[in-house]
Image (spheres, grey):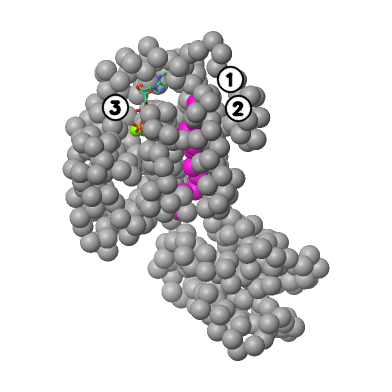
Amino acid sequence: MGAKILVVEDDLESLKLIGLMLQSRGYQVLAAQNGPQAIQKAVTESPDLVLLDVMMPGIDGYEVARRLRADPRTAHLPIVMLTARGQVTDKVTGFEAGADEYLVKPVHPAELLTRIEALLARAARLGPSVVAPRGKSIGILGCKGGVGVSTLAINLAFTLVRGPAAGKRVVLLDIRTGSSTLALQLGLRPQQGLRILAERDPAGLTADAVLAHADRHASGFLVLGGLPEPCGIAPPLLPPHVEAIMRSLEEAMDFILVDMGTGLSEANRILLRRLRYVLIVTEPQRISLLMTQALLAMLDNLEVGRHRQGIVIVNRIPASATPGKEVVENFLQRQILCVIPPAPELAFQAAERGMPMVMLQPESLVATQFRQLAEHLVAV
Ligand SMILES: Nc1ncnc2c1ncn2[C@@H]1O[C@H](COP(=O)(O)OP(=O)(O)OP(=O)(O)O)[C@@H](O)[C@H]1O
Ligand SMILES: [Mg+2]
C-alpha cells in the first residue's frame, strides 16, 4: 500500500482532481474540506503527509499548520502547502506556520509529485524519530465537584482491564497533586509520586521516570495519584510537566485515564487539547445541569470537538422527581452517552472497602453500564 496523503482543500473540484492524480500514483488519499476536519483526520487517521490549501473559510491553512505542529500527535507530519498566494510574505507566513514545502498554484502535477516523494523519502530517512503515540488518552471531567468523577475513573479502569482492554496497559492518572482520592478508593497507600514529578525537570520525564512512581492495582492497572491533602499545599503540575507526563504515558501505555476533577485549570486546558476523548460527568439536578451547560459552552469555545466528548450522567441520588435521560438531553441539547444508575449502598460499601463498585458487585446494573461505556471507549 502506498503512503497515505491527507488532501485539505475546500474546493471540491480541485480536491477530486488532486485526489485522482495521487491515487493514480498509488497513494492512498484522505480528504478534508475544512480546517477542523483536517485537524481531526490528521489525528485519527495517521496520514504520512498533509497537502494543505491555504485559503479556506473559517480556520485557514496557516492556522491548520500551526495547530498540527503544536500537537505532539501530529507535530512530525510533513506538510506541503498549496496555494494561489505567491507573495514572498505569504511564503514566509507558510514556513513560519510549519510548512515543509510551499507550492503556488497552478502547480504542474509532476512537480507536486516530486516534492511529495522527496518529503516522504526524507521522513523515511529520519525514521520513526518521533514515534506516533499509541496510547488512547481519556479524561474524566466533572461539571462540578463531588459528582462522581473519581468513582467513574476507578470503575472504568477496572472494567477495562477485566473486559475489552484485557492484556492492555492501562494507567489511571490524577492531574491534581492534592485532594486526590484515587489511592484511597482503591485501597492503596497514597503516594508522593505526582508531587515529586512536579518538582523534576520536565525534560527528564521519560515513561520509565514517570511510571517509577505508579502503583499497581491487584486487577492489573497502574495508578498515579496525588495526595489526599487539600489542593494548594503541593504545587500543581505546570504545563510542561502535564505535556511531558502525557507524552510519556501515551508512548508507554495503551489507555491513559485522567481524573481531571472539575474546572478549567491550566492543566485541564492542556489536557483538553491533547486528550483523544473526554467524559463529562453530570447529574440530573438543576444546578448541576446549569453548570454542565456552561461547561459545554466553554468546551466549544476551546474547540474541543464534539466527536471527542461524551456526556455521562451519574445518578447518585435516587429521587422520585429526577429528570430522565430525555429531559436532560433536551435541556443540554446534546446526546447522553451513558447513565450510571444510583447505587448508594454499593457506593458506600465499595468506598469503605477501598475497591471499585464493579469489583464488589460484578453483576450489578452499575457494572453493566460500565461495561457498555468501556466498550464504547475502546471503539472511539
Ligand atoms: N452511582 C452512584 N450511586 C451512588 N453514589 C455514588 C455513585 N457514584 C459515586 N457515588 C458517590 O458519590 C460520592 C462522590 O464521588 P467521587 O468522590 O467519585 O466524586 P468526585 O467528582 O471525584 O469528587 P471530587 O470533586 O471531590 O474529586 C462518593 O461518596 C461516591 O461513593
Ligand atoms: Mg475526585
Callout 1: 10 Å neighbours few (<14), some, many (20+)?
few
Looking at the rendered image, the quarter that the N terminus falls into is bottom right
Give the side of residue 260 with respect to residue 378, left or right.
left
The residue at label 1 has a CB less than 8 Å from ligand 1: no
Asked if marks 1 and 2 touch (Cβ < 8 Å), the reply is: yes
Q: Position of residue 94 (x, y in %)?
A: 57, 78
Give the side of residue 174 with respect to residue 339, left or right.
left
Give the side of residue 352 with respect to residue 296, left or right.
left
Q: CA distance from mark 1 to mark 2?
A: 7 Å
Ligand 1 location (quadrant): top left
Q: Which mark is residue 328?
A: 2
Find the magenta span and give its range.
274-283
Q: Amino acid at mark 3?
A: Gln
Q: Which residue is mark 3?
A: 185
Q: Position of residue 345 (x, y in %)?
A: 37, 11
Q: Position of residue 236 (x, y in %)?
A: 27, 49
Residue 93 picture quarter: bottom right
Q: Amino acid at mark 1?
A: Pro
